[in-house]
Image (cartoon, rainbow, N blue to C red):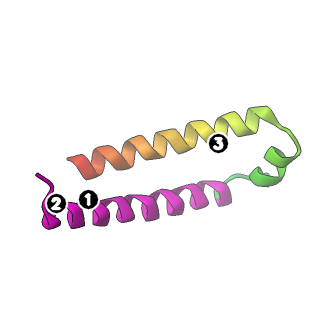
């Protein structure tokens, strides 16, 4: 059964994970020399694929770190 303690812990860990993910993706965006969002909007499919791969990689690392 889902208790309030478990629900609260889940929400806290989810919030921490989202904050770390956004911060990590923002740092990666700033570290690259090109305007990633501008390139994606102009239809650069290679940059969009790379950004998606980085997002998945960050999510896997954060989930593994939170899960332990």
Distance in Å between CA atoms under marks 2 and 3: 33 Å
Dot 3: element: helix
Q: Please say if the residues under marks 1 and 2 sit with CB atoms less than 8 Å apart.
A: yes
Q: Which secondary structure type mostly characterizes the magenta part of the structure?
A: helix
Circle nearer the viewer, 2 or 3:
2
Dot 1: element: helix
x, y (%) of residue 25? 57, 55
* Pick the front one: 3 or 67: 3
Residue at 40% across, 41% down: 60
Residue holding disc 1? 10
Give the left or right position of residue 27, taking residue 10 as reference. Answer: right
Residue 51 numbered tag: 3
Q: Which residues are magenta?
A: 1-30
Above-or-below relation of 59 to 4: above
x, y (%) of residue 19? 45, 65
Dot 2: element: helix
Give the left or right position of residue 21, taking residue 35 as reference. Answer: left
* Pick the front one: 4 or 29: 4
Residue at 28% across, 49% down: 65
Give the left or right position of residue 61, taking residue 40 as reference. Answer: left
Q: State which tag comes first along the sequence, 3 or 1.
A: 1
Distance in Å between CA atoms under marks 1 and 2: 6 Å
Distance in Å between CA atoms under marks 3 and 1: 27 Å
Residue holding disc 2? 6
Residue 34 numbered tag: none
Circle nearer the viewer, 3 or 1:
1
Residue at 16% across, 60% down: 6
* Pick the front one: 32 or 53: 53
Q: State which tag comes first along the sequence, 2 or 3.
A: 2
In the displayed image of the protein, which residue is found farthest to the right? 42
x, y (%) of residue 52? 61, 39
Q: Please say if the residues under marks 3 and 1 sit with CB atoms less than 8 Å apart.
A: no
């Amino acid at each position: 059964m889902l208790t309030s303690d478990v629900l609260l812990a889940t929400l806290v860990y989810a919030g921490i994970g989202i904050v770390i993910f956004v911060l990590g993706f923002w740092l990666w965006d700033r570290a690259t020399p090109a305007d990633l969002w501008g390139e994606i909007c102009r239809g650069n499919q290679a940059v969009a694929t790379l950004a998606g791969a980085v997002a998945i990689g960050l999510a896997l690392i954060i989930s593994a770190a939170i899960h332990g």
